[in-house]
Image: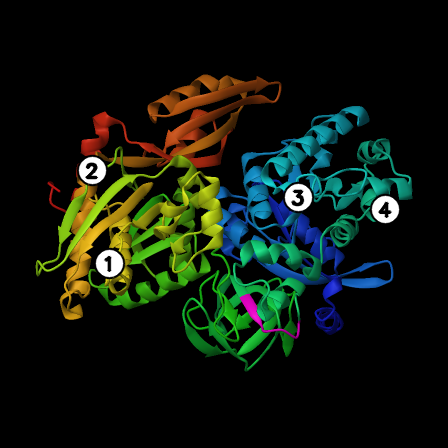
Amino acid sequence: MIDEKAKKIQELMHEQEKIRNIAIAAHIDHGKTTFSDNLLAGAGMISEDLAGKQLALDFHEDESSRGITIDSASVSMVHKLGEEDYLINLIDTPGHVDFGGDVTRAMRAVDGCIVLVDAVEGVMPQTETVLRQAIKELVKPILFLNKVDRLIKEVKLTPQEMEKKFISIINHVNELIFNLAPEEYKEKWKVGVADGSVAFGSAFHNWGLSFPYMQKKGITFKDIIDAYQNDNVKELSKKAPLHEIVLNIVIKHHPNPIQAQKYRIPKIWHGELDSKLGKDLMICNPKGEPVFVPTKIVVDKHAGEVAGGRLFSGTIKQGDEVYMNLAKRTIRIQQVSVYRGAQRLIVDEVNAGNIIGIVGLKDVFTGETVSKNPIEPFEAIKHIFEPVVTKSIEAKKAADLPKLVEILKQVRKEDPSIKIEINEQTGESLMSGMGELHLEIIENRIKTEKGLDIKTSSPIIVYRETINKESPTIEGRSPNKHNSFYLNVDVLEDEVYNAIKSGELREGRVKKKNVDISNALSSLGWPGDEIRNVRDIYKGNIFMDETRGEVHIGEVIEMILDAFEMVMGQGPLAREPCMKLKVSLVDTRLHEDAIHRGPAQVYPAVREGIIGAMKKAGPYLLEPLQIHLIEMPDKFLAAVTRLVGSKRGQMLEVKQDEAGAEMKAKLPVAEMIGWSNDLRSSTEGRGISSLMDQLFEKVPVNIQIEVIKKIRQRKGLSENQ
């Protein structure tokens, strides 16, 4: 039986028009994994009785024990529509905001997305986040309203009220699509009941319906309510099986790889579109040069590192020699496979348009661009939220230090939204994540799955450094006194900083005239001569070279940019990363002889100049804040208000209705350690908090000196900078 399915998958992999690459994305607890179980059962991959209970795509023990999905998981399955068979490559993604990085990476690999919304709760903060992540990668959404059984059994709605509820959720989703999508997709990608791009049902009870299907089969809302009242839900799931409804919609409304790459490639690859390679990518040419982008690295006990991702052009087979563009290394592929949940199906070769797994890409990272020859890499996969909570981590036994270093390198690959800094000399390493839960899960996996005893510090908050005014020009002199660099710093405009964060203005060094950067900056009102001076965009900061007629500048510019990036990584106040700075090199005096202006002279001089300029520009610390939506029963509103106040928080908005109360609050991350426990105790376990946004604001003046002092002490720096 399995062999038959495997054979069919292998046949369909070569028929690009019949492939659909899709992801399921939703807010936590809206029922994604139960939903994907149903799709697998429909494809005959798990028993129908177990659908919704097996959680086939939650492989890790911690996912089953916590009842949440932490990692995205892929599976390929076959679905028949009419007389035709189609190959559906599905990725189930996490809903908890701490694991949102997995959603971002999954979106690079797919062309369509099923947005799942709980029919009772409606659109939630994380629904908005996943929709934003999908649209940013030009992934087309369709909508499934889940848990309709709750509307009938718990909320006891009439057919008219149910319709009203559905319409309000659909309108909310369409409003988000309109606000987030580029101009040409604002209307085109709206979801609607009439055209069947919206379905509803209950993943738990295995049924689903769309308007066209209801018309075809003569089913009404009243029939659904009757099925529940007469305890006849099994009959409903036979009449309207969820997998059939949903996969029919996917085939009808989601693009195949050939259609999708026409508009997705210009967005995610900035190479020459008129070149042979550009054309191959645009048409998803199986005969073109192979280009593969890994979006997920999993370490398999037997095979080693498996890089899962999307093959955008060409054909890849075992034994092929490929080039990793970011690692700048040629390597041989040992194995090619497609996914069937936790199993991998090894195949001889795979062509463009498929989601595949490759073994043999040594030390590969997600977002790498793998091709036959060196090419312009794909745009970096940008995460919506940055890691803001850090823990120091070390092995309990000194002898385990090498093992810890290896495991941390592995963790960084498996989850690139975790930031790891390893100090191999002292044995102390820093691990930064999206929140406490994120770090807790990683710690737990290191102990249980990777079998290493570790100890971790209390959570540390990562601050940012910036300035509040323009500095005078400061001279940085090289240790041999033969070279001088004259630099000043200024505050980067909010619009420019936001464009960098949104990815509209791409980060990286600017080697030649870059049309994308020129267009983005001129639309923000920068004059042409200023745009020409931009040399580097790095972590929300910009470096400008304003020198004129300097003969040797070309020979030292890369070293100057290295030094700029070093300071941006560690500012003068507390060695925390810098943000929103515009650093300008105004003038230089360089020694004629290259031997006197090497890295040992340039680095200290440029760093001294930038740090000196920052100190004269009113430097201050910024702290990370998060905006949370807190839901609770009415009676706990006063207790939650007190809790928010005790954490230096600020209430932004409060809403109350028959379902309970909702508060939008802005909270400093530094005060949020233990937040979920505190919220549970204040609301007798009935309060839920979801992250809506993350921002940085000035640390209150009355505590700034104390905060700087503590950070410097922790880092072993002298008290006076």
Q: Are marks 4 and 1 in contact (CB under 8 Å)?
A: no
User: Residue at point 64% right, 73% down?
Assistant: 350
Q: Secondary structure at mark 3?
A: helix
Q: Amino acid at mark 2?
A: Ile
Sequence-first disc among 3 and 4: 3
Q: Amino acid at mark 1?
A: Glu
Q: Amino acid at mark 4?
A: Lys
Crowd tier of the residue under label 2, counting other residues whose Cα lies within 10 Å: few below 14, some 14–19, many 20 or above: some
Sequence-first disc among 2 and 4: 4
Q: Which residue is mark 1?
A: 550
Q: CA separation, marks 3 and 2?
A: 48 Å
Q: Residue furthest front?
A: 549
User: Residue at point 44% right, 44% down?
Assistant: 521
Which stretch appears magenta? 286-292
Crowd tier of the residue under label 4, counting other residues whose Cα lies within 10 Å: few below 14, some 14–19, many 20 or above: some
Residue 184 marker: 3
